[in-house]
Amino acid sequence: MMRQGMMDQCHQAQGMMGMGPMGMMYGPALDNHLDHIRAQLGVTDAQSAAWNSYAGAVKARASTMENMRETMKQAMRSGTAVARMDAHIKAMEGMTESLKALKPATEALYAVLTPEQKQKADALLGTGAMMCTFNTP
């Protein structure tokens, strides 16, 4: 049921500003998505610092991904075959690095969650919280 609610939210976000290609969320759509995840997890006041660090890391990743997307668009429009391949490689490396940067904040959040919250987190987290794809437990 929780997974269905998240999927519904993603479908709604597709019609809003802030929804990029491949289901990536930016701006207000990402903020709404993070608010929904926080509510689903039932983050307490004692867990707020870990949540805020996680949300900040997700937003930083979204910013990095948006910048990479703009670079890729420019390379695809005007670059040579080699330049396009280089841009693709750089984007993939950036994606990997942005996930690595998100991992410590995710681990810190996960560490302060209760067993029940962890079960929910297993279904809600793991994609960087900025994509409309969800893991199933």
Image: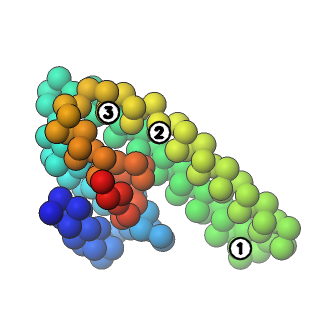
Quadrant of the image occupied by residue 51: top left
Q: Is residue 82 visible?
A: yes
- Kindly identify which numbered label has been placed on residue 76: 1
> In front: 1, or 102?
1
Question: Which residue matches tag 2?
Answer: 102
Element under disc 1: helix
Q: Position of residue 48 (x, y in %)?
A: 22, 29
Q: CA distance from mark 2 to mark 3?
A: 12 Å
Identify the element where label 3 is drawn.
helix
Say which quadrant the C terminus sits in.
Answer: bottom left
Mark 2 and mark 1 lie on one chain; the one further toward the N terminus is 1
Q: Tags 3 and 1 in contact by the CB under 8 Å rule?
A: no
Classify mark 3: residues with Cα within 10 Å, few (<14), some (14-19) or many (20+). many
Mark 2 crowd level (few <14, some 14–19, many ≥20, 10 Å Cα): many
Could you tell me residue 101's position as x and y percent?
52, 37
Is residue 31 visible to us here?
A: no
Residue designated by label 3: 110
Q: Residue 105's x, y, as percent?
A: 41, 32
Whether 113 is drawn above or below 55: the answer is: above
Kind of residue sitting beneath label 2: Leu
For the image, the number of numbered tags is 3
